[in-house]
Amino acid sequence: MGNDLLASVIRIFNNPALDEEGDDIIGRIYEYFLGKFAPAVASDDGVFFTPKSLVRMIMNVIEPARGTMLDPACGSGGMFVSASDYVRDHGGNPAASMMFYGQEKVDYNAKLCLMNMAVHGMQGIIKSGDAANTFYHDAHALDGKCDYVAANPPFNVDKVKWSAAVDAGRLPLGTPKENKKHEVPTSGANYLWINYFYSYLNDHGRAGFVMASSATDSNAERAQRRALVEAGAVDVMLYVGNNFFYTKSLPCTLWFLDKDKPQAIRDKVLFIDAQRYHTAVSTTLNEWTPWQLKNLSAIVWLYRGETQKYRELLGAYRARCAELAKLFAGQAVELLTGIAAAGDFASAHKAMLAAIEEQKSAAKAEVEALPKRQQKKRREELAAKTAELEAAATEVGEAVWLVEKFGEGEYADVPGLCKIASKRDIQGDQPADKSSWSLTPGAYVGVPPVEDDGVDFHERMGEIQAELSHLQAESNDLMATINRNFRELGL
């Protein structure tokens, strides 16, 4: 009865009328409910549902096109869905070109994954239960055979049996140290996962995964990081700030490995610190917008020498700017359209902000001129229009952010944001030092320069001191007046 009911529901939604609204409508409906479900049970023993923007960033860097993808901690299958979307967005057919394999110890997560793949029309094999516990089993016999590995494994797991994990193999970077008292890996299972992701790749494979930030400079596992760097397999390290997960505020790092990096960057690693670059959805949740994802991806393109992709992004920004110009009224439309065609995003952004301020002033005057009973409705209508214009300006602001840093398409290290480091940089002056072989982005990109606000510090401090002295004198006079009044009242 349960299967019949599910089939009936799918038939209700899967019809030509809904297909006209866009492809994969069933998948989008499922994703909506999964998104509502995820915040309620977003973590369990180190397991976290992966936010969509993080998953999409992983796909943007590993660029799946065709072949075999494995997620050995697949959860509800978000990596597979995003990979499928990426292939489709780039003109491919994931059903024909990709085969997905997953391992998931928790049965109900595996069932969610299977449903997710079914409604997206994806080909894949998911194994679950104890036999799919990646620490002890290569359930699909894919060691050394994957074109892509993508995962968000549970962080800092401290219940793995060290001896059993060692016996299971797939540790090409070396065996993580053992905490002999508890018979578990010293630094949790983080470096077991990193070993697996590297081991599963074939000779041209790429991996992208989420990892606890502590793993980038764990002293106990320094030798394994060294092995990765010396193999030339570390491609990009991207630090993510707080509040990207639904119920946890912890930061993380996205690791990207590539066994077939171009020779020009074979001994280099791109470090990105994106902790200051995001959009606040709420006070407890951040994300990357689609344009922010494109901008971060553009840094990777320039590092790889793929300048044509960068120029295509600038073209997309110009087209979008011209489209957004139509939202504005009067002469602003013509002005913004011309600016957009020239690709002068900074001027377009400035003009948009000025037009928004004019819109707010005009809206205020219009509302005040109306009878009281009409003011609330009209104020809400005009506020919605202003919000639409502000969103447009924000989009163009992302183009300004990108062009200010990389112009027409030439990579440059940006303090506080990105740096290309050589193997020698990562090795450090003394390879035996604890600080050597670190893969922490912040250790390389540094901090952004402090903007000069035009205020003379000493002059301003003098003004503040004078103001405080004046307020203190007023306070003393007030206290004297209060005491005198009390005495006059005989108190």
Image (spheres, rainbow, N blue to C red):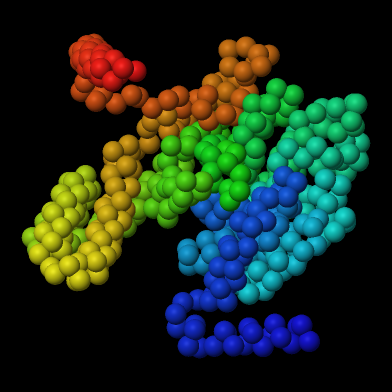
Query: Is residue 45 something one can see in this rendering?
Result: yes
Vertical order, 303 against 355 (above or below) = above
Residue name at image x 42 percent, y 55 percent: 290
The answer to which of 148 and 476 lies nearer the viewer is 476
Residue 123 position by quadrant: bottom right
**Residue 187 percent coordinates (x, y):** 76, 30
What residue appears at the point 68 percent right and 26 percent down from the top-left corner? 218
- Please name whichever residue, 297 or 260, is drawn nearer the observer in this view of the structure: 297
Left or right of 147 on screen, residue 126: right
Left or right: 351 in relation to 485 = left
Q: Is residue 207 visible?
A: no
The image shows residue 427, relative to residue 228, as above or below, that is above
Q: Residue at left 55%, top 50%? A: 54
Q: How many marks?
A: 0
User: Which residue corresponds to the image point at 76% horizontal and 82% vertical from the top-left?
Assistant: 2
Q: Please determine whether, in this image, residue 111 is positioned above or below residue 299.
A: below
> Horizontal and vertical percent for residue 247?
61, 48
Image quadrant containing the C terminus: top left
Q: Nearer the viewer, residue 421 or 449?
A: 449
From the viewer's side, name the closer residue of 72 and 329. 329
The image shows residue 458 at horizontal and vertical percentages of 24, 11
Q: Position of residue 416 (x, y in %)?
A: 42, 29
Q: Looking at the image, is 311 positioned above or below residue 484?
A: below
Q: Quadrant of residue 1?
A: bottom right
